Image (cartoon, helix red, strand yellow):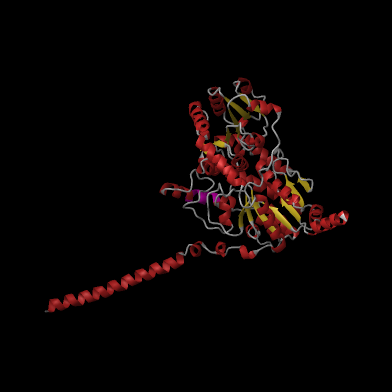
Amino acid sequence: MARILLLLCLIICRSYSLNILVYSPRFGHSHTNFLAKICDTLAEAGHRVVFLEPLFLDKVSAKGPTHPGVEKIELPAPESVRKVFSAQKSDTGGSARWETTLWGDFAVMKKYVALLRFAALEHLKGFYADPDFLSKIRGYHFDLAVSQPMEASGYALFYKLGLEKFVTVFSANPGATYPVIFGAHSAVSWVPTMLSRGIEKMGFRERALNWYYTLLERPVFDSYEGFDEFMFTQESEYPGSKELMLRSSYLLLNSEPLLDFPKPLHAKIVYIGGIAVPKSVEPLSEEFDRILGERSHSVFISFGSMAKSADMPLASRLGLIAAMRMLPDVTFIWKYENLSDPLVKELPQNVYPVAWAPQLALLADKRLSAFVSHAGAGSQQEVAASGRKVLCIPIFADQFANCQQLARVGAAQIFDKNDLNDEEKLVKAVKELLENDGLSKNAEQLAEMIAKKPFTASETLLRHVEFAAKYGPLPQLDPYGRQLSFIQYYLLDVMGILIAALLFTIFIAWKIFQRLFGAIFRKKKVE
């Protein structure tokens, strides 16, 4: 009897399973981890998942999906991509990001996105040149596909495969850019952009700058140059990359609503922030356990994988080392990727450099007093879920907005990356961080709220993906507003007519008044 029930269960589970393609170019650690966690979540629910990973950067060390039910297909980077990324490393690599100002941040971001799109287009050309690959992928008979919006190769591949049901996911802080592209209202006066250094409460200057940053950002992310030209030569009825992307059933954002700036969204845009944060972590090794027990205060320093500590300008590294030397009662665990650097030998005894650190396990340990971080999307959500306070040092792209979000809820202080060479400022900031119990309470409350949300990110993802696979592409969720012109959207034509009518009425009234007044004046003059 038990065997029959088990067999029935397997048949029922299999009949409801979906074939899902997750298209995930490898160009960043946190981006890959986010898509990998989506794969694992879908596979744990019984769905058959293929993780298609075209390599943009071979050196990215993210391990990808871990669930045994996920099939991985890795596509090597074309030689043209390797050459271009190697040649552009000095302009877009980690050291360049450390040294930029606001305008430099924008320039580096623009170049980097252009590189990603070049790599994606080269892979797309490779798909069309390899009919065996297309035949293999088509043979999976996918029910649904998943892709990111930053480049259009995924959507073009879906079109070639005849896949009409797909969802878009975005692994970084979306700011206002992608929600607006998908038809959400552009609330420039109170929703900070990715480049903005402030929060939603803005004065005249901040609103003017935020509007200007919006004008800068939008063309960077809302451009599909090269993709459309290539696809129009291959597919006569290709609708255009942007139009195809906007046919997604949903836009799933890697953003935590308890952290993100509140913004006007619609039913097609859904938060799944925190999905990449594991619910449980492995215990610390004996070495890290010993290190955390040495002093009453312990601080973990990590700047992620895209702007490493080892790429930091020398003056900044020396300033950071001097600051740590001035705080002998604090243990510092410093993720420093080049342990052969001569600077490592000059570190004080309270500093432990490591090429790799178990970040999640360290954040989960209450002996860790604070976290010094760039606040990339992954790190921001991990520290928010852990309840640790943060000294945020944003370096690049969405990290400035991520830091402002943590500070906005009282869980972080922000420090300028250009002040790292000033050890006095840095020591003051670290002391204030460690002594501020209010930050600790706020961080702990935030973690508790995230843990007790009405719906988990995994539940939200599963329900929307399964719904899209069954009923997609859901055009009824697509707001008509995105098809309106600027004049129509902001009712400028209506207001123009009303203003013209008002002015005309005033003009007629004035003319009538002139005639009446003139007649009265002439009558008095005659008398």
Q: Residue furthest front?
A: 1
Quarter the N terminus occupies: bottom right
Q: Quadrant of residue 142?
A: bottom right
- Give yes or no for residue 212 being in the magenta stretch: yes
Q: Is residue 317 left or right of residue 43?
A: left
Q: Is residue 101 visible?
A: yes
Q: Overall secondary structure of the magenta stretch?
A: helix
Say left or right for 29 vs 375. right
Q: Residue at x 60, y 23 (%)?
A: 350
Q: Is residue 140 magenta?
A: no
- In this figure, what is the number of numbered marks? 0
Quarter of the picture containing the C terminus is bottom left
The picture places residue 337, in percent across and down from the top left corner, at 66, 30
Percent of width and height locating residue 427: 51, 27
Percent position (x, y) of residue 91? Answer: 60, 38
How far across and how far down the image is residue 297, in percent?
Answer: 57, 28
Q: Residue at x 66, y 35 (%)?
A: 361
For the question of whether residue 172 can be seen, the reply is no
Q: Please, is residue 158 above or below residue 36 in the view?
A: below
Q: Residue furthest left?
A: 527
Q: Magenta residues?
A: 211-217
Q: Identify which residue, 336 or 427, lies in the foreground.
A: 427
Residue 65 is drawn in which quadrant?
top right
